[in-house]
Image (cartoon, rainbow, N blue to C red):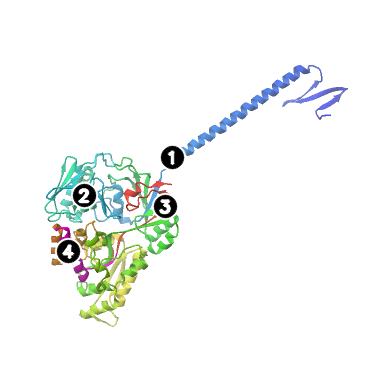
Amino acid sequence: MPDNCHHIKNRTFKILSTSHSMVLIKQGWGEDFLMKRQRFQIKRMVNMSRSRILFILMLVLLIGLMMACSKSETSGSKKVQFNLGGVINPEQVSNFNPLLATGNWENLFPYIYDPLFFFNQVNGELIPMLASDLGEWSEDKLSYKVKVQSDVKWHDGTDFSGEDIVFTFNALKKDKALDRYQIWGDKRLKDVSVEGDSVVFTLNDLFPSLPYYLTTVDIVPKHIFEKENPSTYLNKQPIGTGPFVFKSVNSSAIILEKNKDYYRGAPEIDELVINRFNNSSTLTLALEKGEIQASEGTIAMPSLPKLLENDANKLQVYPGLTVFSVIMNNDKPGLNDEAVRRAIQVAIDRQWLIEKAEMDAVFPANPGFLPTVFGDMADEALYEDTNYSFNHNEAVRILEEAGYTKNKDGIFEKDGKELSFVYNMAANAPAQNKEGTMITQWLEEVGIKTTVKLVTWPELTKLAMSGDFDLIQNGISFPPDPQAALEVFHSKMTAPIGENTSGLNYMRFKDSEVDAWLDEAFTADEAKRKELYHKIQKKIADQAPIAVMYNVGGHIPYRVDEFTNYDESVPVHSSLSLSKVKKK
């Protein structure tokens, strides 16, 4: 008998359980009515259960949809940041004025400002930026007309116009200290004016290199700079036309936001975070860890092989417009002797520097200074000429022949004066320090004494400009034109010790013949220019106002594990490339 059935006085009853009580129902007595009621209650309970289950399912579905939407909104609103790295000292964020040579980190400006043209060091071509085309020369070649991009706005919403271009170039005209490459020099630029939707550059004489010089000038907003002195304005809140808008700066980073209204198309990333590092070693470590996606070219070269073992890391290398050298102050005692400079030149093993210190990520330097990026304008014969190659014995012979003798300490001297110089190089730069250590060791082995002094990169520039130095290990960068590169050695580009140079002739080198050849080449045809440039290079190699180390355009490390769509037809860290990169 089932457990729910019992005999009471020979009567059989069923026990019905409810949530409140047990009800005994006599079998056969009103059973139909009660059973119907029971079935109704059961059906009602089932229906209620179904409703509750349906309600719960709908509730779960609704919550799921809400969470999905919330997640979608969160992921959709999350900013895409690209982390770039650079060695940026505190004194390099004291101003954000692209017209000033010191007090700023010049690698920042291409992300905020645009020039008329961009020189692409990867292939040597000009790319129109604020210019809508490559410009047009007049028949007599004494004026150059550039059509200006339309629908360009400054980051504050003000319309950009040709008047901004005119103002910028006139600012350089009014203050020669701002005109680093002498665009307004003798026989060069005469006037800049607006003509309709174009800007016209009028010249005093032939200046075929003008378009390349225009790549060196970032255009600034007239409506802001005209209220200030451009030569002293700190420009703490820079307003440009470039693909990224300045947001803030702190001790760890410079933060830029995408320019949604950029005339070349808004960047794909939301923020460009330029992380600040004290030295290349910590920057390289951050790159290895994936904390940054690229650097502006800085890398601890000894770490390069390990870095490239990871397939996520790539390196873009191209020759370019910077020649690293031992810059010699030709006005200082001892260094004003050509024999001493030539001895220093051949005491340096350039091949060792390239292979062991720079890990073959740079290019051989021309003893005559002009790099191969300028094609046959560079005298390639000088590269292999053994008269300028590393030769310890030749360095000793040159000094002895010039009347120098070694003292009891093994240091060459003449008239009681030792060849002893202060050797300035960048602090916290492992590759540079390794190279400087070897160079000073080589000089000591020859018999030239050095005292090493470590300073910041900005301090190196200040020393070079003022002439307050003996030897400086640093790079010299120049506009993308062979005339501009060789004019580094023109006497008009220098100044006496104690005065800042007007150009890049930090060596205080002066030679009337070199000046005359450069002046003649300025307006000569291509064939004559080549002839004159080769003569100039030979004389620079012979007189050794500078001891070249190697040529570098870029050795740019970058990661491809989180971002894609780098444009490798241009420098991958350039604004043109970083405007296109996308998060994977």
Q: Is residue 233 above or below residue 356?
A: above
Q: Earlier in the sequence, mark 1 or mark 4?
A: 1
Q: Which residue is mark 1?
A: 76
The amino acid pointed to by label 2 is Pro
Q: Would you say residue 99 is visible in this rendering? A: no
Q: CA distance from mark 1 to mark 4?
A: 61 Å
* Residue 327 spot, x, y in % from top left: 25, 66
Q: Is residue 534 magenta?
A: yes
- Report the magenta residues as a range: 524-550
The amino acid pointed to by label 4 is Glu
For this rendering, which residue is in front, 380 or 488? 380
Location of residue 18 by image quarter: top right
Disc 2, SS: loop
Q: CA distance from mark 3 to mark 4?
A: 45 Å
Q: Are marks 1 and 2 in contact (CB under 8 Å)?
A: no
For this rendering, which residue is in front, 235 or 359? 359
Residue ID at (37%, 60%):
299
For this rendering, which residue is in front, 183 or 394? 394
Q: Which residue is mark 4?
A: 531
Q: Which residue is mark 2?
A: 230
Disc 4, SS: helix
Q: Earlier in the sequence, mark 3 or mark 4?
A: 4
The amino acid pointed to by label 3 is Val
Q: CA distance from mark 3 to mark 1?
A: 22 Å
* Residue 416 spot, x, y in % from top left: 22, 80
Give the mark count. 4
